Amino acid sequence: MSSSLTKGLRRSSSRSVGRSASAAKRSVKAKAAKPKAKRATAAKSATRKPAKLKPGKKALTKAVAKGKKPAVKVNARKAAPPKKAVSRVKKTQKIAAVRAIRPTPPPPPPRQPTQDESAALAAFERAHREFVRGRFAEARNQFRILLDKFSQVSEVAARSRTYLAVAESRLRTESMLPRDADSLYDRGVIELNRGEYVAAQEMFERALKREPEAAHIHYGLAATRARLGSIDLALESLQRALDLQPNLRVRAQHDHDLNPLRNDPDFDRLIFSNPA
């Protein structure tokens, strides 16, 4: 019994050993077979034909394979600006050149006055000349005649009406003024003290027309012209006043109305020199 058991055990152990050895051999063979399959697939993929490349891409791949820098070609059609933009630029350049060459047209000639306008202007100049001279009565008459004849010339007529109103106002003022020289002189002194130097000058000038040799009137006119800034005319009036009445030099030395004349050397000569 014991020998048979030992024999059975040996057989079963040998079988199990054989089986395990065969299983190990199979697993080793399977593991060894796997890389062969991978190698076969890699070989198959390497043996496949490369895809066809375009001419530009072929040159690029060759240059990369050789280790050179590929020369990139620029598509001239894509780099160039569109034809429409070029044509617009050319048109603008042509227009600018034509404008630069083309001369600017001269301004239209001024409109020539009509016969009535020319006559109205001449009449206005004559009336205005009398107005400036202080002949307000004559100026008033001429402006009235002008408005009767040339009222249709609107611009000249409007200016004539303005001067006519001023002339009539001055004539009304003259009619209200005193007639004698002394009254005019007193009125001039009042206007001078009020600071109305233009009105004071007018009063003194009117007084001198009635009494030209009055030294005090010449002196008042000198003070008024000095206040107005008419230095040369003021010195002339002062010279005339001192010639007529030399003792006015003492008054002139302290007169504040003559302060604008004190920086003038002629004033010092007139006031501080000994009378001849």
Image (spheres, grey):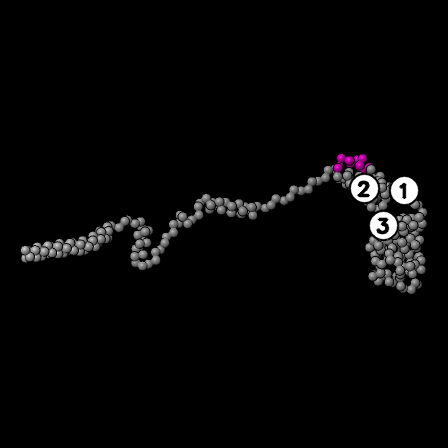
- Of helix, strand and loop, which one carries label 1? helix
- Of helix, strand and loop, which one carries label 2? helix
**Residue 181 shows in the view:** no
Front residue of 147 and 242:
242
Q: Which amino acid, by three-letter code, is at mark 3?
A: Glu
Residue tagged 3: 196
Q: Residues within 10 Å of mark 2 (few under 14, many from 20)?
A: some
Q: Is residue 5 left or right of residue 52?
A: left
Q: Residues within 10 Å of mark 1 (few under 14, many from 20)?
A: few
Quarter of the image containing the N terminus? bottom left
Labels 1 and 2: the sequence-earlier one: 2
Residue tagged 2: 163
**Magenta segment, which residues?**
145-154
Q: Is residue 27 left or right of residue 140?
A: left
Pointers 3 and 1 in contact (C-beta within 8 Å): no
Pointers 2 and 3 in contact (C-beta within 8 Å): no
Q: Which amino acid, by three-letter code, is at mark 2?
A: Tyr
Residue tagged 1: 175
Instruction: Single out the mark in the foreground, 1 or 2.
Output: 1
Instruction: Single out the mark in the foreground, 3 or 1.
Output: 3
- Which residue ends up furthest to the bottom in the rendered image? 274
Quarter of the image containing the C terminus? bottom right
